[in-house]
Image (spheres, rainbow, N blue to C red):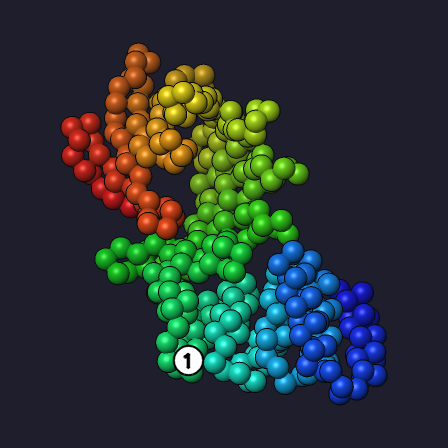
Amino acid sequence: MKRVLSLILALTLCVGLLGCGGSSAKWQEQYDLGQKYLTEGNYEEAILAFTAAIEIDPKRAPAYVGRGSAYALSGDTDDNLTAAETDFTTAIELDATDPDAWLGLADVYIRMGDYDKAQETLERALEALGDDDRITAKLAEMEEGRFTDSDGHPRKTCHYEDGTLVEYWLYDYDERGNNIRTTCYDADGAWQNTEESEFNDAGQEIRMVETSEDGTRTEVYTYDAQGRRIREDRTNVYEDGQGTGYTLISYDDAARTETHESYYEGKLENRFVIEMDENGVRRKASNYTADENGELYLDYYVEYIWNEDGSYGGYHLYDVAGDRDTSE
């Protein structure tokens, strides 16, 4: 960031020498360059290019929106998020009809963890714009208890029952976008549990530790040469005892199934068989539980629900008689 600030200062001095001739074309050139770097994920160069555009014409909002986006996507540091907040706020002051500026400012507040302010920002946006499909859709997500950043990462999700908040989850990510921490709280904000994960260079989760008031659960994951998870080893250390277990995962590409066979203290507990369609999308899963003799019997099955846009929509749970037990 120090390098960026130094280069910005140098750009400020250089741009001052350009004069007014052809300033519009020069602004467009720097703005387009900033957009190119932003699309490529080269946020440092994007910041420099947008800064050059701003120095050429500080009254044009789009360059502030671009630079604010670059700052926000550079990482959730206080400096980056404060700079992004300033840029998006300036853009709105210059042009309150730009929905990207409002969405960008709301995204900053989501990344800051100020979810109420994010929602208030988009409510103000509708007052200024009258209507906007993207802002309306984003507000609808928030009202359902889903707060997602511009990278598509959930930052907060809420669970309601009959319209009453029961619990919620907060998510943290590393610089590569890996979900390294998920923390659950009850409706009053009291901590329930935390899951912390480690990832390898390929982005595969290799270890997870869940901590709660009752103790800890540690899982270690193994992958095959194709990058598919094939084993999960678990160690539980709780107040009422401890134990170890593991799950073996196998794949049948011809039958389009994925089978999870779980053992605890060396004894078979259950087999979970997932069925996929021709596109590899999960459609159904059946759970077989082992009796005291180790014999498996069908306990229940689930059918997965997918929305029209391809996003996950929950599932229906059925008992062995085929009667729907519950839906999530």
Q: Residue 138: image x %, image y %?
A: 41, 65
Q: Could you say which is closer to the camera, residue 179 or residue 192?
A: 179
The quadrant holding residue 293 is top left
- Residue 200 or residue 251, whichever sits in front: 251
Q: Which of 9 and 76 is in front in this view?
A: 9
Element on which disc 1 rests:
helix
* Residue drawn at the location 33% of the way across and 44% of the way down: 306
Q: Horizontally, is 283 left or right of 16 in the view?
A: left
Residue linked to disc 1: 129
| Residue 75 in view in this figure | no
Image quadrant containing the N terminus: bottom right
Would residue 327 be visible to someone looking at this image?
A: yes
Count of labels in the image? 1
**Furthest residue to the top?**
293
Tell me where residue 182 appears, x and y as whole percent. 50, 49
Residue 327: x and y in percent read: 25, 44
Q: What residue type is labelled 1?
A: Leu
| Residue shown at 49% from the left, 55% from the top | 152
Position of residue 141 relative to residue 231, above or below, is below
| 41 versus 268 height, above or below | below
Q: Residue at x 39, y 73 (%)?
A: 132
Instruction: Please tell me how crowded label 1 is: few (under 14), some (14-19), or many (20+) other residues with Cα within 10 Å.
Output: some
**64 shown above or below 226:** below
Question: Going 27% across and 55% down the picture, which residue do you hit?
Answer: 161
Quadrant of the image occupied by residue 27:
bottom right
- From the viewer's perspective, tell me whether residue 28 is left or right of residue 170: right
Q: Is residue 141 above or below residue 300?
A: below
Q: Where is residue 125 in the image (x, y as percent from the top left)?
A: 43, 77
